[in-house]
């Protein structure tokens, strides 16, 4: 029986031209055995949806550092949530989500309530993301614990 590595689609919001965060996340994922589809900066919502549907992704990772995440991620998530559940992976979010740099616990909970599987912010974001990834099994049916 052949198994495949888990697949992650890495994207950002359409206004975010930063790439270093996406490359970093790609390296973190690849070091843990993931195959990564990195959609690059200024990712159009339609491209995110097409990539999720066409890739058999196990995880969608949205990272933004331009401070506009709280403004733009609801529309991105709404579009992804239109994908049938049987092919829709969990969606996680991280980075600098507002221009002040800090995000309240209430805002994090609101994002989870909207449908994000998890939200990674502050100085613990990378460690928390790596812990989240450890809940996936590497193989043909990668699932979160």
Image: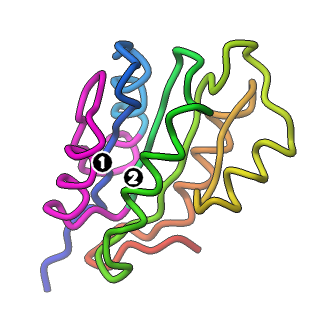
Label 1 packing within 10 angstroms: few (<14), some (14-19), many (20+): many
The residue at the point 35 percent across, 64 percent down is 58
Q: Which mark, by number, is residue 60?
A: 2
Pinpoint residue 50: horizontal percent, then vertical percent.
Answer: 18, 54
For image coordinates 32% across by 69% down, the residue present is 83
Give the CA separation, mark 1 to mark 2.
5 Å
| Label disc, if present, on residue 93 of the rendered structure | none
In percent of width and height, residue 41 lies at 29, 22
Return the x and y of residue 15 as percentages of the image width and height: 39, 20
**Displayed quadrant of residue 19:** top left
- The magenta stretch spans residue 53: yes
- For marks 1 and 2, the one nearer the N-term is 1
Q: Secondary structure at mark 2?
A: strand
Residue 118: image quadrant is: bottom right
Secondary element type, mark 1: strand
Task: Report the residue marked by disc 1.
Answer: 9
Q: Residues within 10 Å of mark 2 (few under 14, many from 20)?
A: many
| Number of numbered markers | 2
Tell me, yes or no, whether the two marked residues, 1 and 2, touch with CB atoms within 8 Å.
Answer: yes
**Magenta-highlighted residues:** 29-58
Is residue 18 shown left or right of residue 145? left
Which residue lies at the image location 45% right of the left edge and 40% below the top edge?
Answer: 62
Pinpoint residue 138: horizontal percent, then vertical percent: 36, 67
């Amino acid at each position: 029986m052949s198994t495949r590595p888990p697949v992650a689609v890495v994207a950002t919001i359409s206004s975010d031209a930063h790439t270093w965060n996406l490359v970093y996340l790609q390296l973190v994922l690849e070091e843990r055995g993931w195959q990564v589809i990195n959609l690059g900066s200024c990712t159009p919502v339609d491209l995110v949806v097409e990539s999720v549907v066409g890739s058999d992704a196990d995880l969608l990772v949205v990272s933004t550092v331009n401070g506009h995440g709280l403004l733009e991620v609801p529309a991105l998530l709404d579009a992804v949530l239109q994908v049938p559940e049987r092919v829709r992976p969990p969606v996680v979010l991280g980075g600098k989500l507002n221009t002040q740099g800090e995000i309240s616990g209430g805002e994090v909970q609101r994002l989870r309530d909207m449908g994000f599987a998890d939200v990674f912010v502050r100085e613990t974001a990378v460690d928390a993301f790596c812990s989240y990834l450890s809940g996936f099994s590497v193989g043909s049916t990668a699932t979160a614990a």
